[in-house]
Image: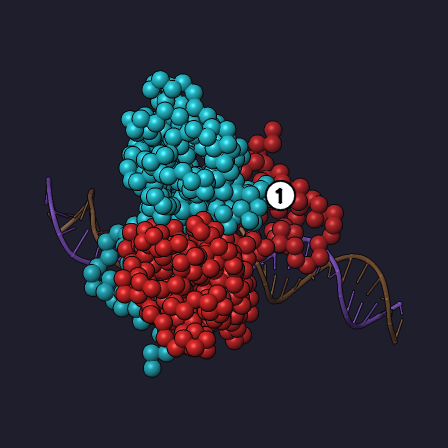
Chain colours: A red, B cyan, C purple, D brown
Amino acid sequence: MTDALQPTAARPATLEDVARVAGVSRSTVSRVVNGVRNVDPAIQETVRRAVAATGYVPNSAARALVTRRADTVALIVSGAGETGGDGMLFTDPFFGRVVSGVLCGLRPPGMHPVLMLADDDASRAQVIGYLRRGSADGALLVSTHGGDPLPALLAEAGLPAVLFGRPATSLPLSYVDLANHDGARLAADHLAARGCRRVVTVTGPADLPAGQDRQAGFREAMARHGRPWSPEAAGDFTLRGGAAAMTRLLAEHPDLDGVFAANDLMAQGVLAVLREHGRRVPEDVAVIGFDDSSAATAAHPRLTTVRQPVEEMAARMTALLLDRIAHPGERPASVLFEPHLIVRDSA
Amino acid sequence: MTDALQPTAARPATLEDVARVAGVSRSTVSRVVNGVRNVDPAIQETVRRAVAATGYVPNSAARALVTRRADTVALIVSGAGETGGDGMLFTDPFFGRVVSGVLCGLRPPGMHPVLMLADDDASRAQVIGYLRRGSADGALLVSTHGGDPLPALLAEAGLPAVLFGRPATSLPLSYVDLANHDGARLAADHLAARGCRRVVTVTGPADLPAGQDRQAGFREAMARHGRPWSPEAAGDFTLRGGAAAMTRLLAEHPDLDGVFAANDLMAQGVLAVLREHGRRVPEDVAVIGFDDSSAATAAHPRLTTVRQPVEEMAARMTALLLDRIAHPGERPASVLFEPHLIVRDSA
DNA sequence: AGGCACGGAGGGAGCGCTCTCCGGCATGCC
DNA sequence: GGCATGCCGGAGAGCGCTCCCTCCGTGCCT
């Protein structure tokens, strides 16, 4: 019977057990398990056999207690609204891509993200507490609006954190971001080259740097093309918000022939409204989105859009955080990604 | 200066520190912090003040070591394919809704899910290891295909786990599921009542119980309406897969007047193909989806669909797991939810 | 030949917390 | 007034692991 060696449900095997079975000390087993320092190959083999026989798995709490590492990072989605909003939030393909990228970045070191929502003071306190008590070694933060106090709280507490998107106010935190300004310029140039003369914009939330930059970049580029001002309506990065904004713009500017939407979800709403009003896309009105999310190819016609390499950015954000956790002393470094125009059918 | 009381970056305050400041023993501080047993109100107040003064936060590793609880659950998405597949996966609004529901269910006890992907043997082993070493107390599992070996592994290891969706083979694990059979019947009844006579089906993956049940339920209900057989084409629950299936069906049965798609994403693909072929929806062809995901309202025309209360189901799944963790001895209990038909514009 | 350096294994001290046990004090009952 | 009964606080033993320190043995240099 190997029963005595098997970890019983009541008491899983410990280092001590393995040591006894292998006839060596705890220290030696630990060294073999962690692959540190030189251990005699023969003993290594003995220990490995003992580990297999006992079904030993290191206890993470005990390890974390002494290493002061949880080997876990928090992935925080900050600034969501109500419960209804949460649904919206995770339904947004953007977050799916962020998650995907983070997972890729965390895979090599064998880590996994803890998903947290921070949408009010209580949950923000919870997030800070979670990190302070060492449940996670650092935080990846995706904010949905500019007024989010969490980045400042994180910085103040001196916790390792990396943001997706430049913070609204300057903070001693690393971040990854897209050159949103340049992306908007690409859209403007394309629309101008197409000969659109009456272009309108559906902007993102005014308090989000990404929204501001896209708006500003688009304005400036249009000005350079001799169109100093184009009508704008504020959206909120949702399909519904985009549709509402487009409805307003269409009422006020029925002769428009081009639309720049600050993200693909809003562009989808724009397309729906244009269709309802009998405008053909791209024949009557050219539409450009932003992100190159799954919504872009799901839309009809397929969206011409500014590609944001979200997965790659999220993976890089993760790498920055891991680096920061490994080397706490260093200054925060940030990374800016370049956008690309993806021409499809809508413009 | 309160400096001596503040937790320095170098060494956060421990129970011992608080005890010293408050002039009581570690035990008493622990009791106050955890709110167990009676402690003299005056002393309680003193301790609370000391906690605030020191900025004490309990160390989770130390606590977990002795309580043998991580106060964390794993949310495992199992059966994803390649990295490209991951993107697809989290982009699917279905997962967003699951995440949302899980988060709601975990909020009351102040817990958070660790997101894990299990798409190959290595990652499955990683998941099992993660749970065995006590990094998480249990697992919530969403499988994307029926052949997934993870549920069996979880059951075999005796780890607390609850599945979203009935497992392909009977297993001693709890699960939540939708009465998919009934849902499909709702769709069939509606199509029949509408007078559709040449109805086709875009099915889900054949190895997923949800796909099988919807297919079987639809078939049976149609038979009851005197239509013993309707053409079927297999999709894979993606937009692209739905479009491909629809293209095939349309080529073989150009006179079709109704489509049942086993999920909304595929229904979106169906709509796109029908549009390309100049079929009007619902005038020429009625289309019914399944899930009532965000894709249903984003589609044009808006999808008539069978509602699956995913958030609610996910929240319930979470409750089942927490219960199972709290009371390890009990038998697994499962919950079945009832679907509802949401009539919109497409049928 | 003696000493020194170094590789490799064991011993033991914690990491910060919970929880059981125990002691002391106030109270209630006969 | 004496004894049983709570009730509340303290002491201390770990939880399972890492890691520093010590110690031993071998090989090499002088």
Residue at 32% across, 51% down: A276
From what the image shows, is residue A275 above or below residue B279?
Answer: below
Other residues around mark 1 within 10 Å, as few (<14) / some (14–19) / many (≥20): many
In this rendering, position of residue A250 left or right of residue C28: right
Q: Quadrant of the C terminus of chain B?
A: top left
Query: In the rendering, at what x and y percent does residue B20 appear?
Result: 34, 68
* Residue found farthest to the bottom: B1
Going by the numbered disc 1, the residue's amino acid type is Val
In this rendering, position of residue B302 left or right of residue B238: left
From what the image shows, is residue A250 above or below residue A224?
Answer: above
Say which element carries label 1.
helix
Camera-side residue of A267 and A318: A267
Camera-side residue of B256 and A166: B256
**Residue A127 in which image quadrant:** bottom left
Residue at 64% across, 42% down: A50
In this rendering, position of residue A138 left or right of residue A46: left
Can residue A174 be seen?
Answer: no
From what the image shows, is residue A173 above or below residue A254?
Answer: below
Residue at 70% across, 48% down: A44
Query: In the rendering, at what x and y percent does residue A109 appear?
Result: 57, 56
Number of residue marks: 1
Residue at 32% across, 49% down: B104
Can residue A335 be seen?
Answer: yes
Circle 1 marks a residue in which chain?
A: A
Q: Quadrant of the N terminus of chain B?
A: bottom left
Query: In the rendering, at what x and y percent does residue A114 appear?
Result: 44, 54
**Residue A154 in which image quadrant:** bottom left
The residue labelled by disc 1 is: A51
